[in-house]
Image: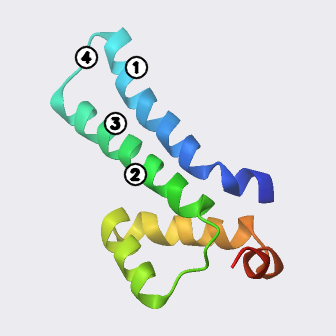
Amino acid sequence: MKEFAKYIGVIVMLIGVAFFVIPFFMGTTNNTNLIFGLLLVVEGMLGHIYVNNMKKGSIISNILWAIILLFVPFTVFFLFKKAAYTEEELIAYN
């Protein structure tokens, strides 16, 4: 689970790419698919940066990340960050 948690952002990005590719090959591309795909790709990229940032972060930085990532994806990425790194690893980095 620990190795999987580090790559959750990449998985979200790949789901976003699937939102682009599948409708393209089916010939049913519309703006809704493009918006959801773009949102998932950007959220995955930012989430990957957040999860793999080894700094523990303060309350203010977590609030800023919550605003940037939107609140629901932030809680998902926050939980995966907790699963990816132990407290000893975070303390050793900080």
Q: Secondary structure at mark 3?
A: helix
Taking depth in this image into account, of 30 and 68 the one nearest to the observer is 68
Whole-angstrom CA distance, mark 2 to mark 4, is: 24 Å
Residue at 28% in and 10% down? 27
* Mark 1 and mark 3: Cα distance apart in space: 9 Å
- Which mark's residue is nearer the viewer, 2 or 4? 2
Question: Where does the image place residue 68, in percent across and percent down from the top left?
Answer: 32, 65
Q: Circle 4 sits in a helix, a strand or a loop, which is it?
A: loop
Q: Mark 4 and mark 1: span between their CA atoms?
A: 10 Å
Q: Amino acid at mark 2?
A: Glu
Quadrant position of the C terminus in the picture: bottom right
Mark 1 and mark 2 lie on one chain; the one further toward the N terminus is 1
Name the residue that disc number 2 marks. 43
> What residue appears at the point 44 percent right and 63 percent down from the top-left corner?
73
Which residue occupies the extreme right position in the image?
A: 88
**Where does label 3 land, which residue?**
37
Q: Quadrant of residue 79?
A: bottom right
Q: Quadrant of residue 32?
A: top left
Query: What residue sits right under mark 1 in the picture?
Result: 21
Instruction: Say which label, 2 or 3, has the lower sequence index.
Output: 3
How busy is the neighbourhood of tag 1: few (under 14 within 10 Å), some, or many (20 plus)? some
In the displayed structure, 47 sits above or below 86; it is: above
| Looking at the image, residue 6 lies above or below residue 59 | above
| In the image, farthest residue toward the bottom | 59
Q: Which mark is residue 28?
A: 4
Of pointers 4 and 1, the one earlier in the residue sequence: 1
Dot 1 amino acid type? Val
Report how far apart the C-alphas of labels 3 and 4 lie in the structure.
Answer: 14 Å
Whether the residues at callouts 1 and 2 have beta carbons within 8 Å, the answer is no
